[in-house]
Image (cartoon, rainbow, N blue to C red):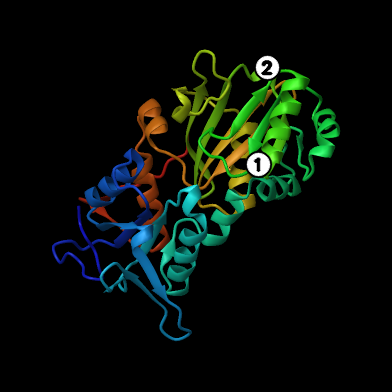
Amino acid sequence: MNTYYGKKDESKNGLSIALLASNIDLYSNQRILEAGNERGHNMTFLDIKQCYMKLDAKEPEAHYRGGKLLNNLDAIITRIKPSMTFYGCALSRQFESMGVLTTNTSDAIKKSRDKLFSLQLLLKSGINIPTTGFANSPMDTNDLIDMVGGAPLIVKLLEGSQGRGVVLAETRKAAESVINAFKTLKANLLVQEFIKEADGKDLRCFVIDGKVVASIQRTAAPGEFRANIHQGGSADIVKITPEERKLAIAAAKALGLTIAGVDIIRSKNGPLLLEVNSSPGLEGIETATGKDVAGMMISSIEKKLGWKRQLGNVEKNTLQQV
């Protein structure tokens, strides 16, 4: 793995691209670094916790552990895990102030991470979601349950991710117990209608630069209602409808995300938006579809920076719409 501290590998004529994340061993991070290297770019992994910054109006700087200056980057691929949102977005803003291209801006990441705010923005853009309730006090529990059509219903922690912090309450009594328990812990939560006809399935649409480049259907493991791959769900290639494609593109645009994983559920009233992920995983979607999604992410950066890679006399364009 290349280690980059403002010094380019002179054997490469490509761009200097850094991946800002937390775990170099994750499949998604390995694939992105591999895809960039294959295209002749200077790739490096930057551990969020080992970066720090100098705030200065004339000469803003970003440093890496040991005082190494990060001053010669062309682009940053921002893959910030939920627990590092505050500091990760601060670093992203710093690179933005230095004129470095960031794949997803700090502002867009912050919007996507606030589940309540993101749903409000999506609704403002005319995007349909499952009926959702939010309240501050346990005294409003009964009305909150009625608001979303009663049990069964879904309870979601605002800070949850990858299916964690999501509970299916099958009866009204169970719903009351779960909501009140979370409220006792002073946890912020959403209460959402349960779409029974979805039958434990949802769609993950991978959006890059306003195009759906790959899509899969995720199916929950036996006895599980969450279709997330991290919760044991399986993934299969799927052909999405024009309406679903339009919804996925609109959702990413509403939050200002260049790269997004958009989760959609099929209901009797048409597709509904579940969630938009600013750091979508690649393993499930690349394995199921056979598409080089990591390569498409690198191609997006090349396009924005006007960098062209030639294979003989033919320019390779990996960004495709499915």
**What is the residue that sits farthest to the top in this orientation?**
222
Do the residues under discs 2 and 1 have CB atoms within 8 angstroms? no
Instruction: Give the residue displayed 64% in from the left and 20% down from the top.
Output: 198
Image coords of residue 169 (percent x, y) = 69, 23
The image quadrant of residue 40 is: bottom left
In the rendered structure, the answer to whether residue 87 lies left or right of residue 147 reads left
Could you tell me which secondary element the residue under label 1 belongs to?
A: loop
In the rendered structure, the answer to whether residue 180 lies left or right of residue 158 reads right
**What is the residue that sits farthest to the bottom in this orientation?**
58
Q: Residues within 10 Å of mark 1 (few under 14, many from 20)?
A: few
134 above or below 43? above
268 above or below 243? above
Q: Nearer the viewer, mark 2 or mark 1?
A: 1
Does residue 257 appear anywhere in the picture?
yes
Disc sitting over residue 197 in the figure: 2
Does residue 270 appear anywhere in the picture?
no
Instruction: Give the residue displayed 70% in from the left and 18% down from the top.
Output: 170
Front position in the image: 137 or 42: 137
Q: CA distance from mark 2 to mark 1?
A: 32 Å
**What is the residue that sits farthest to the front in this orientation?**
184
In the rendered structure, the answer to whether residue 312 lies left or right of residue 33 reads left
- The earlier-in-sequence mark between 2 and 1 is 1
Instruction: Give the residue displayed 21% in from the left and 60% down from the top.
Output: 3
Residue type at mark 1: give it.
Leu
83 above or below 239? below
Image coords of residue 180 (percent x, y) = 73, 34
Residue type at mark 2: give it.
Glu
Instruction: Give the residue displayed 21% in from the left and 70% down from the top.
Output: 7
Image coords of residue 133 (percent x, y) = 77, 38
Number of callouts: 2
Q: Residues within 10 Å of mark 2 (few under 14, many from 20)?
A: few
Residue bearing mark 1: 185
